[in-house]
Amino acid sequence: MATYVIGDIQGCYKGFTRLLKSIQFRPQKDKLIAVGDIVARGEDSLSVIQYCHDLGEHFSMVLGNHDLHLLAIHAGLRKPKASDKLGKLLKHPDIDQYIDWLRSFPLVKTWKKDTLIVHAGLYPMWSFEDAKQASKFINKQLTSKHYVKLLSHMYGNTPDTWSSQLSGMDRSRFIINACTRMRYLTPHLALDFACKTAPASAPDILQPWFQKYNPHLTAQQTVIFGHWASLQGHTDSTQFIATDTGYVWGNKLTAVNLAARKSFHVNA
């Protein structure tokens, strides 16, 4: 049995199935973990959802910002953009079932204790355990019957700095932003949402979250993330593995065999 982590699929069903074929994925034996953003922008989000859902216990994922946005659209809190190509999915008779299924997934998950999987990254003030507890805080709200309240307050860029004293929706919003939208940080560890370029083109005052010192992270621990297509999979560190290689933008879709730490790609 092999376990693979796959980068941002974003509704690109054809590329998704080509990648699974290339790694000889066995649906009844192997396991697949998505780093989030399995929907939106690609040609067939519905087929991606259906395939992943039908894998049952052989599929798991962490939620990304586009997945959360789909939940908000379904709840009537936001309107879909034409560029997200979600119409077929939203009109499907099983959409409520798929939404409840998505709500069950966490923001972070671990594999064999030494590997953390998250959509955007690990905030440098957090340990693996801190991130897991933060994820549980959100998951409890997402799986409750009052989950729409969380979705209605999750949008916004503040607070941009972590404090253990944060509470209520401020705490929830920061956790969601750190786990699903983070790329760059200021010298004071404030989240910056304006810059999305590769590090070589970023302002000098900003640093990628994975270049910030994290006193809680040991050399044996690895963070696997997506979200940041302009990195093209490059972090200059084997400790931080970037899996969003921009397939939806005409580049590559990436999967990583977790045990072997070997990457596989298909071109758009």
Image: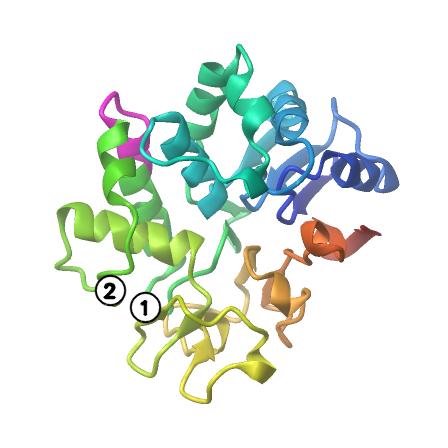
Can you identify the residue that label 1 sits on? 125
In the rendered structure, the answer to whether residue 168 lies left or right of residue 197 reads: left
Mark 1: amino acid: Met
The residue sitting at 40% across, 26% down in the picture is 74
Magenta-highlighted residues: 139-146
Is residue 198 found inside the magenta-colored segment of the image?
no
Of residues 36 and 158, which is closer to you in this image? 158
Q: Quadrant of residue 174?
A: bottom left
Mark 2: amino acid: Trp
Q: Are marks 2 and 1 in contact (CB under 8 Å)?
A: yes
Can you identify the residue that label 2 sits on? 162
Q: The residue tagged with tag 2: helix, strand or loop? A: loop
Query: Mark 1, residues whose alpha carbon is within 10 Å: few (<14), some, or many (≥20)?
Result: some
Q: Quadrant of the N terminus?
A: top right
Q: Quadrant of residue 28?
A: top right
Could you tell me if residue 181 is visible in this image? yes
Q: Is residue 18 above or below residue 232?
A: above
Residue 120 x, y percent position in the rendering: 48, 57
Spatial CA distance of label 2 from label 1 is 8 Å
The residue sitting at 68% across, 56% down in the picture is 246
